Amino acid sequence: MDASAAKLLGAGLSMGLGAVGPGIGLGFLIGKALEAIARQPEVSGDVRTNMFIGIGVTEAVALYAFVVALILIFVAK
Amino acid sequence: MAEVAPGQGSTAVVERRRSKLRRVWIGVVLVALVALLFLPGGAKETFEVSQEFTLHPIVKLPKVGPVDLSITKAVIYLWITVGVLAVIALVVNRSLKAQPGRFQYAIEFLYELAHDGIAGSVMKSGCDTWFPYIGSVFFFVLTANLIGLIPLPFGEHGQLAFYAATGNLNVTVVLALFTFLFTQYAGVHNKGPLAYVRSWMPKGAPPFLREFIFVIHIVSEVFRVVSLSVRLFANMVAGHAILAVFFAMALIFQNYAIAVVLQGGSVIIFLFEIFVAVIQAFIFAILSAVYIGGALEQEH
């Protein structure tokens, strides 16, 4: 396997595997938030704000994988 | 139908004529799609996603040291963002009415969201002190993200292209550094430098654990800059890359039919990108507020 093929393979793998964890995490996070809102609709505003903060933090992990993929494709020699 | 409207007979005729017209239209579209399937390929051009993000100098300026001062589309998008924000602020400020119109109501809604929803909801004290920064970050990122979704003629050869000011790591790192600096300033200003640094160590912890947590806190404090900037940057770049790929389907598949069908997908992606633009501005502002608020009342 030559270097460019390995580079592309690594980029695809990093993005794909890097999306698994945040995907599971986001599922848990939003599911629990919806559960909380369904149980106590009167605090839905607070729950939603905190949910978005959590989404931002969780999603960042997937985006690191994306940046690594970009680096592998465009920067790595 | 209990009541018979006076002009009902004629509307029924119009309705029938319309449905006939609709059937004709659907037939034309279907025939066109089938015809497209047998057309020989799209334009014979290659498509490279990374071209969308390379910065070509539009106005060439000399280098000063290591810094290239040429005006690229990133600079122009920043200017446009600042200009739009300034014009909106001036127009709204000049024409404030007690009975708000549609435009003023929208701006007031966004202001209230920034004030009560973002700064007020996560900062216990110091909301009024720090709202100017949080609010301007929110409006700047929101405007930059949304302008990034409007095709403007700043492509390589002056063609219409997408680019976002926040899709550039330099811009987002500067914004994140501002948040970092203001966080430290807020802590030092509120508690005094020594008490602020001491507040990074939990009081009741055993000796070695305390230093360990201190180091971890410093690392996390620095890493916040990375996560804050990379999150916004990667979101905008990923969104624009997906949009570019979907819009260039005709070039990638070399077939018109697939391209026409997948344009529907590009519309959905575009709507999702509008959502992402708003959410990312919200998240950037609210995380800035959380960090600054945390420095204000940090008691481990």
Image (tube, rainbow, N blue to C red):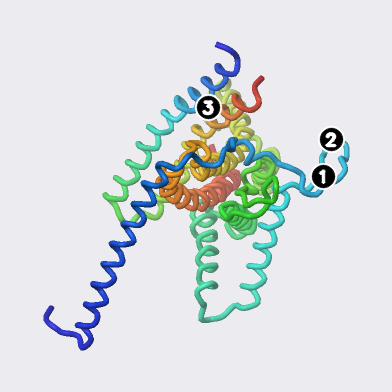
Query: Residue B45: x percent and y percent?
Result: 59, 38
Q: Is residue B206 above or below residue A67?
A: above
Query: Answer yes or no: do the residues labelled 2 and 1 have beta carbons within 8 Å?
Result: no
Question: In this view, which residue lies farthest toward the bottom?
Answer: B6
Q: Nearer the viewer, mark 2 or mark 3?
A: 2
Query: Residue B279: x percent and y percent?
Result: 49, 50
Q: Nearer the viewer, residue B180 or B217?
A: B180
| Mark-to-mark CA distance, 2 and 1 | 9 Å
> Which of the 4 quarters of the picture holds residue B229?
top right
In which quadrant of the rendered image does the N terminus of chain B lie?
A: bottom left
Residue denoted by label 2? B66
Q: Nearer the viewer, mark 3 or mark 1?
A: 1
| Mark-to-mark CA distance, 3 and 1 | 52 Å
Q: Secondary structure at mark 1?
A: loop
Q: Secondary structure at mark 2?
A: loop
Query: Answer yes or no: do the residues labelled 2 and 3 have beta carbons within 8 Å?
Result: no
